[in-house]
Amino acid sequence: MARGADARTGGCLCGAVRFTATPRQPHFGACHCAMCRRWAGGVWMAVGCGPDVSFNDSAPVATFSSSKWAERGFCAKCGTALFYRLRDSGHYQMALGAFDDSSGLTFTRQIFIDEKPDSYAFADDTRNLTGAEVIDGYLADKSAGAIAGTDEEARR
Amino acid sequence: MADARRQGGCLCGAVRFSAIPKKPEYGACHCSICRKWSGGPWLAVDCGGSVVVEQGAKMGAYSSSEWAERRFCTSCGTALFYKLKDQDFFVVSLEAFDDAQGFTFTEEVCIDEKPASYAFANHTRKMTGAEMFEAFAEAQEDKADRSGKSDG
């Protein structure tokens, strides 16, 4: 259920894509899996926003089916990485950098920490999950295993 | 082997390229453009003019500023290169290389644009956006002096 007061707007570099999304929790996470690293080109940081994300009409959102459980969305015109979306639940993880205002969002989680290259590390105090832990969590609860802002976090 | 040509490409394989990293080092950029393009800080390697893209690559280009463009795969959206418009100067996403091993994280730029909400733990050389431009301009002048003519 969308809480209007917490809805945030965002968009891509060229402005062709605009969206409104409501972070489920005021948290973001980083994913270090090989796919996210290659796709983003850097460190993929995202916010769990549930299934209710709205885009402007005729937004040039292209999607790439990256695995059997998820797709990745980007702007077809400028290449901005917009979201990672789980098929079963329809839950979006919206790119942190795509929000117009990401203030007030805390870095709480790092996932696929076992795939992270040793050459960089974050100084922040986060809860870290290995790939196996993420997948186990996802299989147990299809809205879990997401980067941050999951139902599981809300229950804690 | 800093001067070895390395292969790389996007997630879906529609873009394949090779490049020679100038040094076995990468930097992070925290500017708002990089963070919007990549979702988080961009990690990249200076490859000068060495980038060769295979024919038929599905490459898109977006003019992100007056002086540069960003190139990405139009099929899967992978962020690949930052390229200056007026010269053969490419900065390549670290993770676009098939083998991204052996690089040291040495530098963070546009540190003045970095949100306070995350920080790398690494000991890196940090530069603001202005310092980075200044360092780049100096390097360009050095290059021009050494070659006895201006770039263009």
Image (cartoon, rainbow, N blue to C red):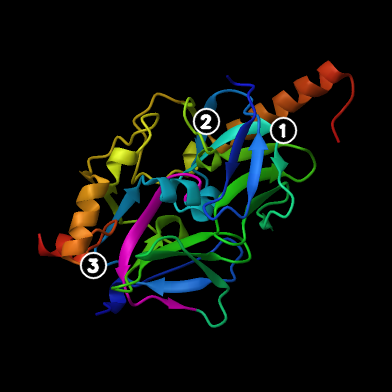
* Residue A97 drawn at (x, y percent): 45, 55
Residue drawn at x 71%, y 44% is B53
Residue B127 visible? The answer is no
Residue found at the very far right of the displayed protein: B149
The image quadrant where one finds the N terminus of chain A is bottom left
**In 3D space, how far apart are the residues under numbered discs 1 and 3 (Cα atoms)?**
44 Å
**In 3D space, how far apart are the residues under numbered discs 1 and 2 (Cα atoms)?**
16 Å
CB contact under 8 Å: marks 1 and 3: no
Towards the viewer: A107 or B24? B24
Residue A54: which quarter of the image? bottom left
Residue drawn at x 61%, y 64% is A14
Both marks 1 and 2 on one chain: yes
Name the element at disc 1: loop
Residue drawn at x 31%, y 52% is A29
* Residue A82 drawn at (x, y percent): 47, 63
Both marks 2 and 3 on one chain: no
The magenta segment is: A40-55
Up/down of B68 relative to B123, above or below: below
* Residue behind mark 2: B26
Name the element at disc 3: loop
Q: Earlier in the sequence, mark 1 or mark 2?
A: 2
Q: Residues within 10 Å of mark 2 (few under 14, many from 20)?
A: many
Towards the viewer: B65 or A95? A95
Q: How many marks?
A: 3
**In 3D space, how far apart are the residues under numbered discs 2 and 3 (Cα atoms)?**
35 Å
Towards the viewer: B117 or B2? B2
The image quadrant where one finds the C terminus of chain A is bottom left
**On what subunit does the disc labeled 2 rest?**
B
* Residue B110 drawn at (x, y percent): 52, 39
* Residue behind mark 1: B50
Instruction: Inspect the image, locate mark 3, and give the three-letter code of the amino acid beneath it.
Output: Ser
